[in-house]
Each structure stands twice: as structure tokens, then as C-alpha cells.
Amino acid sequence: MPSTPITIRPPSLSSSLTPPPTFTLPPISFLSGTWHVTHSTLPMWKTARNVTITYKPLSTVVHGQPQLDDLVAYQPLHSDKRKTIAGVDTYSKDGHGAWDWRGKGWLKIASSRWEVLGWGVREREGEGAEESPDGAAGWVVTYFAKSIFSPAGIDVYTRGESLEEAMLERINDGLMTVEDEGFQKLVGTMFEVKRD
């Protein structure tokens, strides 16, 4: 049985046409929990390993929009020390499915914007794409807008520590459907994030 094509929408700042009509944003319950960053175009992850991002819904609401606690954890390539970047994501009112990140503590001056371009559940052999209750087979493609601290970039997350080659190929095929030359160049710089 052939695999269902992956739907990837263009970033909201893209010169591409409107998002595919079949795209829907993931519920917060799907985003919640820990994700492993398996592939990226962001230069900061070239010198890091074991990168995870944990989202946790907060009870606070800002201007009627939900918020997520956002904790990034990683290890430098040549160190066992675990580093973290803590922030809060507020869902953007602009209707594009974007989240506005603001750092915590001394990082409160830092901000960025990210959005989900694609998401789903990996199909298992002999089964359809049924969502497991714990989201164990989930995957997400996120886009980060350029900020004063980093260039624009794409991350691929998965609930497991790795992403099967066939699934990565399907995600890449979906990314290649976005008709935006700058975005395509960015996709061409994707690399695997190191894991122990």
C-alpha cells in the first residue's frame, strides 16, 4: 500500500502561494511533551547533540491566546554538561499558526517566532496512520523566522530519538512541494543532528 503524501505548508512569510487546503494546525495536546530534534538547518545545532524541546501548556492566557512553557535542552558536542534554554511561547493572533517565543530570566530580551509547517503520525508497517495515545510516533516540521540571534531555519522533531530514512524522505518530499526558491535553498542545507 503506498504511503499517504505528507502535507507541508509554506511559512507565513514565504513568497509561495497560500497554504495547502488540506493543512490543519496540530492541537496543543499533540505538541505537548518532549520532542527530539533529529534534523535541522539551524547552525546552532551543528555544535550540539541530544537536542530536545519540551512543550507544556500553561494556564495563563495573553490577549486571549494560549501559552506554552518551552524548554530546549542539549549537550555541546565535546561536553557531558547539559544546557538549557527556557522560554514561553504565546500563540500569535495573526491566524498563521505561529508562536511568539520570549526567553525567561536573562534571556527575556530575546524573542523569536516559530510555526508548524507539517505534522503527523508515522505509519507503522501493516497499519494506517493511527495516532498512538502517547504520541510516540509523532513528527513535526517547524520553521523559525530570522531573528537578531539566528538565521531563519527548519527543524524536524520526532517523539522517538531517531527518524526512519523512509519517513525522512517523505518529509523532504513534502518540503520540496513549497514553491519558494529561498525556502528550497534552506531545505537543501538540512543536516542530521547528532545523538548519542
Image (spheres, rainbow, N blue to C red):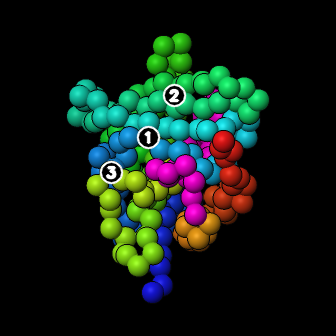
| Residue 162 covered by magenta stretch | yes
**Residue 163 is drawn in which quadrant?**
bottom right
Pointer 1 residue: 34
Residue at 69% across, 35% down: 48
Magenta residues, start to end = 144-164
**Kind of residue at badge 2:** Ser
Residue 28 % position (x, y):
31, 45
Q: Are marks 1 and 3 in contact (CB under 8 Å)?
A: no
* Disc 3, SS: loop
Q: Earlier in the sequence, mark 2 or mark 1?
A: 1
Residue at 43% across, 31% down: 70
* Disc 2, SS: strand
- Quarter of the figure that contains the N terminus: bottom left
Q: CA distance from mark 3 to mark 2?
A: 30 Å
Residue 24 % position (x, y):
34, 61
Q: Is residue 84 above or below residue 91?
A: above
* Disc 1, SS: strand
Residue 193 appearing in the image: yes
